[in-house]
Amino acid sequence: MRYFFKKQGFTFLELLVVLVIISLMSALVAPRLGGALSRMNSKTAAKKIAASLRYARSQAVSRKMPHIAVFDFDKNRIVIGNWKPETPGTGNWELGTGNRELEAGKIYDLPEGVKLESAIGGEVVSGLFQINFYPVGSSSGGGVIISDEQERLYKITVDFITGTVQLNAEQKN
């Protein structure tokens, strides 16, 4: 009786060829994956800023107290809060005026590689830009543009009459 042994397994050469193919495929795919992650990072940051602004508006309406969104261009973050309580009808709601202090409720630091590019509809004073939200649902209006390392831009705007927040992808000119 003859026993024929079947060849089982792979030869070293076959394993080596498969490893080379996998290496080449990963070398081609990895750079594309990195770009997609970066794009997702900046888009997520833009969505979080828009959500923070919507939060500020809803807090102003529900608590019947003006809220403020302060964009800190130097520290690359947004602070949502309200003014510390004082006698109603006194003081000014503008940042840097009067003796009022901001009670920070929510702070969002932008991720690495994403930065506040510019303000829309207002002036950046000492690295700060603000948008006020009032109890009736309106706002002072304005917006910001953020950018990432690949020069993608996102524009977040707040309507001054309705206080609604919009997010749009922009093209670099």
Image: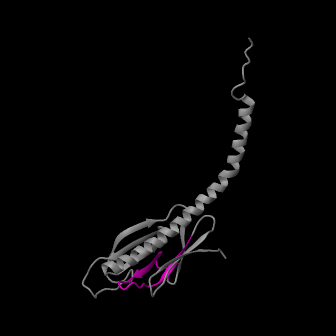
Is residue 141 rendered to the left or right of residue 11?
left
Q: Nearer the viewer, residue 171 or 110?
A: 171
Query: Where is residue 13 drawn, in percent x and y?
Result: 75, 31
Query: Where is residue 65 drawn, in percent x and y?
Result: 32, 81
Is residue 98 rendered to the left or right of residue 37?
left
Q: Nearer the viewer, residue 89 or 136?
A: 136
Query: Where is residue 87 drawn, in percent x and y?
Result: 24, 84
Q: Residue furthest front?
A: 1
Q: Nearer the viewer, residue 140 or 23?
A: 23
Above or below residue 49? Residue 21 is: above
Q: Residue furthest left?
A: 87
Q: Is residue 144 magenta?
A: yes
Q: Is residue 126 magenta?
A: yes
Q: Which region is colored magenta?
A: 123-146
Query: Where is residue 38 drawn, in percent x and y?
Result: 59, 60
Above or below residue 27? Residue 42 is: below
Q: Residue at x 55, y 66 (%)?
A: 43
Quadrant for the C terminus, please.
Answer: bottom right
Above or below residue 142? Residue 55 is: above
Quadrant for the N terminus, please.
Answer: top right
